[in-house]
Image: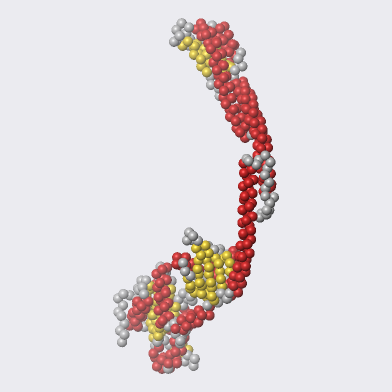
Amino acid sequence: MLCALIVGLAAFELEYKKTLARSAAVQDQLVTTVQASATVAAFASNEAIAQEVIQGLLASPLIAGVHLESLNGFEQGGEKTAQQGEAHPDVKVKDYPLYSPLAPQERIGHLYVWRNQQEIHARAISAALDYALVLALQIGVTAVLMMLVSERILGNPLNRVARALEAVPPGSHQRIAPIPGHENDEIGMLVASSNTLLDAVERAIAEERKLQAEVDEMQAHYKRIFETSNVGIMILHPSGQLLNSNPTLMSRIVGVRFDTHSAKECQDFLEAIFCQPQDAWKMVEEARDSGQSVAADLQLKNTEGKPRWAHCLISVSRGPDGRIDLIEGVLYDVTKRMEREAATREAAAQDALTGLANRRGLEQFLSQACERAARDQHAFGVMGIDLDGFKAVNDTYGHGAGDEVLHIVAERLSRLARQGKDLVARPGGDEFVVVIYDIERAPELLASIAGNIIRKLSQPIRLHDGTLVHIGASLGIARYPEHAHSPETLLAAADEAMYQVKRQGKNAYAFHTPTAPRPNPD
């Protein structure tokens, strides 16, 4: 039917154009029959013959107007036909030249003819519609007959085969009966192929049921092991989404509290449970590249605020193309072991008298600060502090009073430092070091902090027995990376600046300068 519509439209357009062409040809034939009379009328300037020619042409319904004129000024019908022509501006006037009967090469006038566009258009539309309707009707009838024949020959048998196939339960012995009259044609081949497929499906389902029973038995065995294990087990998608885990992982290992459903919805389970998930992903990459398990201690996130640690064993399962299919992880809770190790490290890096970092702790912090500052393009300052007047306190009031002074100095310095960023250390004796991290290379900030330290340490210190003692401080400042790039050179630069202050009067601060003289060890 669509084809009939398209062909009908094309036929209409074609017939319309043909009718217009025929109308033009008829006009030319009419003009040819009167062209000789029109020539005589123009040659002789004969009005009667001219009117006869004009009226003869106007008698045709295809012509809307006629105008005859000669080159010597004779014309007939000009004004009326011009108005008619103006009523049809889309129709061009056709000029038929008139030649002398005595000299055929000499033009003596013109015969202008206007078509009756409305009449021509109406005739063309009528003829085109008749032609298009007949053609469309012919195609439509043919299409209906073909549909009926196809439905009887193909549609009904195929519907019977489809309904019979739909009625067969999967895995049953039931088969499709042959369609009478179609045993040896394509429909018969379809029935035979469908029965062959049903045979294969029945065998496959029987085999699958057998294998499923064996798998169920194995799964029950491994599930008991999986659920009763004392270690946390997790199975992850290559994207990091949790696919499966045992109860121990959620109840005893992971410090973040969420139910199994929300855990499996998490797009990156490693991000959700580890404080440094990038370290876990590095383990995954290493396991993928080496083909072996990778182990490390990683800190777990914890909603209770207490640090927790897990010893992680990561391995991956790869497909034939080398890509990761699954990420497998085994986690042991090693929080107590890490706490013992941290306590041991802290005790080794802590000053017993003041609780501040000792020389070892200071060196460790400076080493890490240099690495971090080099990586992040940051600056930090190191302040070397030596107490002025401390020896007099020690000699006058005893070592107990000196220790008390050192303890109070440590408290005052600690209150001036920023928690989590800066470090206050006592390398030994009455020497202290303050590390101010991330100063954005602003000397004025270090100068402000140094001034506060000088003022704070210059305030009187009341001992436990009520005695007031006074001390001061000489402070030298070195900046990374402007003055030095390593812990040793930074401390040395700060010491040089500090000794420069002592030489110039004490109880002040100074920045390191390359020309500062090195102190005499004696």
* Quarter of the rendering containing residue 456: bottom left
Residue at 39% x, 91% y is 392
Q: Residue 43 at what x, y percent from top left?
A: 50, 7
- Would you place residue 143 above or below residue 218 in this image? above
Q: Residue visible at 51% across and 7% down? A: 40
Residue 272, percent from left and from top:
55, 68
The x and y percentages for residue 183 are 65, 42
- Apparent side of residue 500 relative to residue 57 in the rendered image (left or right): left
Instruction: Specify whether residue 450 is in view.
Output: no
Residue placed at 36% from the left, 83% from the top? Answer: 506
Would you place residue 378 above or below residue 109 in this image? below
- In the image shown, does 276 or 133 lie closer to the viewer? 133
Is residue 49 placed above or below 156 in the rendered structure? above
Q: Is residue 417 left or right of residue 521?
A: right
Q: Which of the two residues, 310 or 482, is positioned nearer the viewer here?
A: 310
Reply above or below: 194 against 261: above
Residue 487 at x, y percent in the picture: 37, 76
- Quarter of the image where one finds residue 481: bottom left
Q: Residue at x 43, y 80 (%)?
A: 361
